[in-house]
Image (cartoon, rainbow, N blue to C red):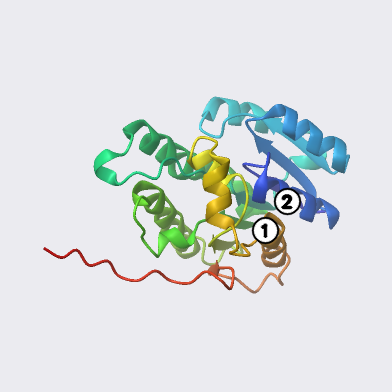
Amino acid sequence: MPTAFITGATAGIGAATVRELAGSGWHVVATGRRADRLDALAAEIGDLVHVAAFDVRDEAAFEAALAALPAPFSDIDLLVNNAGLALGTAPAQSADLDQWRTMIDTNITALATVTHRLLPGLVARKGAIINLSSVAATYPYTGGNVYGGTKAFVHQFSLGLRSDLAGTGVRVTSIEPGMVETEFTLVRTGGNQAASDTLYGGAEPMTAEDIAATIAWVATLPPHLNINTLELMPVRQSFAGFQVSRA
């Protein structure tokens, strides 16, 4: 029975992916900051889920969680780097530097740390890595600044991993969604429900379950196939036009 290690599993895409994989018989290590939500997820799903509550930016807590993994969950076949966030919508010249640092620490540094630590085992087991990037990695928009930059890192890092891991049997995929209605905008705006409703209203956005099903599909492809990059958008979302500032 394969085992997945999923970061950011307390809500949204992460929680949906835990449900999707466990529903297919995977053992799942579900991690995140909010212990109460993880406990509820474990109670809902049962023995196929092991939860570990820690902030992905806290390397010592991450190492402690790994050391405490029970035998059925200790050999990781799939790493899903889902933990990440956007903070703020201000243009760069008026953005909050602390928010920039939090995004970099979470979306880049923590992702790289988790990946580096789990790589030897993934190589030994010919496993897989699925990184959650975003269409913001490719298509810039006003206020996206550092968030888009962090997701561009995830995209390029995934391709770099593929290059380095050639011949090991390890598969690496960057999943790059557009609009997905989760807590994403609430987190970004400090809990502004109206802003979230306005963004997603009438757009028929994708759901966390849509992305979780995509992750499960990628994870269960035959071992000789690799999806390098997979970009998804709801049908009602498309590419932005160029900006022109006139005197």
Looking at the picture, which amino acid does disc 1 mark? Thr
Residue located beneath label 1 in the image: 207
Q: Amino acid at mark 2?
A: Ala
Residue most extreme to the left: 247
In primary-sequence order, the first of circles 1 and 2 is 2
Q: Could you tell me residue 5's position as x and y percent?
A: 68, 45
The residue at 56%/71% (across/down) is: 236
The secondary structure type at the circle numbered 1 is: loop
Residue drawn at (46%, 54%) of the image: 154
For disc 2, the neighbor class at 10 Å (few under 14, some 14 to 19, many from 20) is many
Relative to 137, residue 107 above or below: above
> What residue lies at 78% left-to-right and 31% top-to-bottom?
39
Q: Is residue 17 left or right of residue 151?
A: right
Of discs 1 and 2, which sits in the foreground? 1
* CA separation in Å, label 1 and label 2: 9 Å
Q: Tell me the residue at 74%/28% (across/down).
A: 36
Let me know if residue 69 appears in the view. Answer: no
